[in-house]
Image (spheres, rainbow, N blue to C red):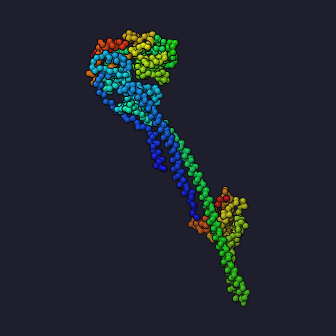
Amino acid sequence: MTELELTSWFRRRMAALVASISLVAAAVAPVVYHLEKRAELVTIARADAARVAAAIADLVHQRQQFWRYDASKLAERLAGEGLDRLAALSVRDASGRAVGVDRVASSPQAPLLWGMAHVEIDGRREATVWVAADATALHRGTALLSVLSALVWLVLGALLYQVPVRVIARAERRIAGLMGQLALTMQEGERSRIARDLHDGAGQALTAARLQLLSARKRADGDAARAPLEAAMKLIDEALDEVRRSTTALMPPSLAELGLLGAIERHAEAFGQASGVRVRCELSTSLPRLEPHAETALYRIVQEALTNVARHADASDARVCLKARGGEVCLTVEDNGRGIEGDRKGGSGLDSIAERARLVGGKMSVENAGSGTRLTVRIPSA
Amino acid sequence: MRPLVAAAVIALGAGCAGDPPPPPPVKASVAAPSSTAIVALGTGAMTALAEALASAYRGEPAVRVEASVGSSGGVRAAADGAVDLGMVSRPLNQGERAQGLVEVKVATAAVALAAGPTLGAAGVTSRELVDLCSGIHSTVGAEQATLLLRDRDESANIAIERLVPGLREAREEAYRARRFRVIYHEAAMREALVSTERSLGLLDLAAITPPLRALALDGVTPSVEAMREGRWRATRDLSFVYRSDREARVEPFLRFVRGPEGRRIIEQQRAIAHGSEAP
């Protein structure tokens, strides 16, 4: 079963979305601050320009055409009224000539914001005044606020990203678990159906055939007539035994009746009798409670692993170990056979075991141990 | 929605951007002289004298004296050709001399401390003046007094500081502390002295007429005689400056100023006339 890949899909989209939101949000505060403060500075500069323009208008009234030659005294007067704090001042008469009051910014590199005002007398423009405000503090404030805003939104963005991603990841794990349970349930259901069909179909037919042969043997005269009938009955008995074994394998006694440990011990005993491999069980009695589908998966894995031992290991002894370790249940099946070659580590039996383990959120590993093979499955406990 | 937001942001940004900076200044072209009169403009220290001379002058064109704009303004106006004669009450600085103006000294005038009508003191000492300017005391003799300052560039300050050591530093500190009212023109100082209670301030001696009184400084009463005798050294030279291309135009008037009639008028204005050479 393929993984949902929901979390990775969501991560990519959340990353882009959160990055965009964080970028925009982080920019809002410094941009708004900059625009507001800049507007404030411009307003102040324009107001100062208007004050200077008003003073020049008075001068024009007093000195008329020669007002521009009195402007230097005006500049001193304005300085005395507190306008010496201006970052820069510039006055041009109607012809564009300077009138001797220009003051330049103390720092040539200082960023300036200009405010302008006209001097108009009776509808006639006599002069234009420019006043500059130093925007250095504004730029510093904007830079500082940008850094702070970026830091804040870095943290908030990380939270905005992590929280839903974790929720989705948790949901995905839950869905994967449910899908695994469903798969196992469906598998078990199919096994039960096949076991029932075998029992009800082939088993019944073989039993009926045996009865017919038994009746025929009773009626037969002589050993020559009875011998083939007895041979046929023997074959049917063997077939019936095989049907029973298959039925038992497909539909084992309920784990709810024997428990996981009891079911494993029963199977190990039956396996040992059938295969001749001595199986030793070391099953911890203090295992944490597992979900039913997880117990079923572990039981099937033991079945599959012992079947592999019988088919491929050429072993005389096997050990089944089950214990709890660090929030996990660890199942180990070891044998003293010929070990596993590199290119055979991925056989269909092992694939089936790995798939079962994955369906319950676990992992499988297989390695050579001594002369034999060790198969380990770890699944998380509930 | 997005175009609206974008338009709003652009409009806000444009509104906050401020006004465009000032353009580079246009170079002044030389103005043409007035067709009706020889125009004189500059220091208020010379205004009364120039008006008296202009009034007595009978030549053509007549001379018109404009309201005070200070020595610096007079020099610039003359250099621009906006006026025929600039009036200055201080030496020209290097930059002004480099403009190639012709300077003609006409008189030496005294600068004195003038007392307003409600100030009873007859004189002040250098120490009192420095302390008054520094804010250490606010009395002259035993009387409360209010000092009215002239603007920084005023030549009268330089003149009086020859007599009063430490006064320049005290004055600078007073400007920084904004301790006193600052008056920017001679006529405005006269008006302020008349209208301000128990006030004193610097004026040209010729401008100190009733109800104002000239105060003695360290026991020396300012007068033309005291100037001649060297007892009163708070003086400044009064000069006309003009462009060389206006020489033919202003020469007749200047000849008049340096002649016997002009010298008499200068003496009447309580100043000492300078040499009588033709410009």
Measured along the vertical axis of the image, is residue A296 above or below residue B137?
Answer: below
Instruction: For residue A306, say whether it is visible.
Output: no
Farthest residue toward the left? B248
Instruction: For residue A102, say whether it is visible.
Output: yes
At 67% across and 59% down in the image, what residue appears?
A381
At 71% across and 63% down in the image, what residue appears?
A283
Q: Position of residue A163 (x, y in %)?
A: 59, 52
At 39% across and 27% down in the image, what residue appears?
A60
The quarter of the image holding the C terminus of chain B is: top left
Measured along the vertical axis of the image, is residue B150 above or below residue A85?
Answer: above
Q: Nearer the viewer, residue B95 or A133?
A: A133
Q: Position of residue A28 (x, y in %)?
A: 51, 44
Q: Nearer the viewer, residue B100 or B62?
A: B62
Classify residue B149 as left or right of residue B63.
right
Q: Quadrant of residue B201?
A: top left
Q: Quadrant of residue B69?
A: top left
Classify residue B140 as left or right of residue A320.
left
Q: How many discs appear?
A: 0
Q: Quadrant of residue B233?
A: top left
Q: Position of residue A113 (x, y in %)?
A: 44, 36
Q: Nearer the viewer, residue B269 or B211?
A: B211
At 48% across and 14% down in the image, what residue appears?
B118
